[in-house]
Amino acid sequence: MQGPEENRARPYLETYFNKRLQIEPTQTPAQLSQYEIARIQTQATRILVAMDVPRRLGADATSAELADDKRRCRRVLHVLRQQMLSWAEQDESRIQQRPIDEEDRREGSTLLWKTWWKDHKKYLEQRRAYLATWGLKTGEKTYANKSVNRLDQELKQMEHAMR
C-alpha cells in the first residue's frame, strides 16, 4: 500500500512520464542536481558574455533594442540564479565557480534570444520528462516531484523574463 506522499507525487509525475525514454538508473539525486547546477551555470555564463556584447544585435540596433536586450539579460540571469540556488538547496557552497571558455564566448557573442528561448524551452521540457520517468522507474518519486516542479518553475519564470 502506498503512503499519502507517494499518492500525491505519482499523478504529477505521470503527466510527464515517457515509458520509451531510456534512463540511467544508477544516477543519484545528488548527481542529477549537480548536472542541473552545471547546466544553469553554463547558460548564465553565456548570457553574461552576451550582456557584454550588445552589438551582437547588429550595428543598426536602436537604443531601445539595446535597452530591451540588456533588460532581458538581467531578467534571465535572475531566473537562472534563483533556479541554481533551488537546485543547490539554497547552499551556495554547492555552486562552484567555472571559468569562461571559448565556447561560452562564441555562444554568448552570437546569442539570439528567439533561438535561445526555443532551444532552452525544448530542453527544459525534455529534461522534465526525463526526471519524471527516472523518478517513477527508480522509485525516487519525492526527488523527481521536486525536480519536475523546479523545471516547471524555470519554464514559467523564463516565459515571463522573455517578454
Image: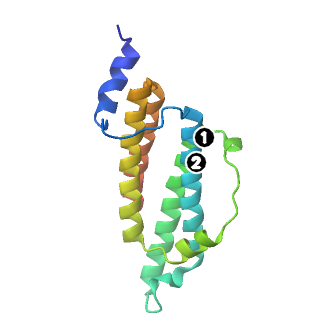
Looking at the rendered image, the quarter that the N terminus falls into is: top left
Q: Position of residue 148 (x, y in %)?
A: 41, 38
Residue type of the residue flagged with mark 2 = Ile
Q: Residue at x 67, y 47 (%)?
A: 95
How is the structure coloured here? Answer: rainbow
Q: Position of residue 40 (x, y in %)?
A: 54, 53
* Left or right: 92, with 3 as reference point: right
Alpha carbons under labels 2 and 1: distance apart: 7 Å
Can the viewer see residue 93?
A: yes
Q: Residue at x 53, y 72 (%)?
A: 107
Q: Is residue 9 above or below residue 115?
A: above
Image quarter for residue 120?
A: bottom left
Residue identified by numbered label 2: 37
Residue type of the residue flagged with mark 1 = Ala
Q: Position of residue 128 (x, y in %)?
A: 39, 43
Is there CB contact under 8 Å for labels 2 and 1?
A: yes
* Left or right: 27, with 1 as reference point: right
- Image mark for residue 88: 1
Q: Is residue 41 above or below residue 54?
A: above
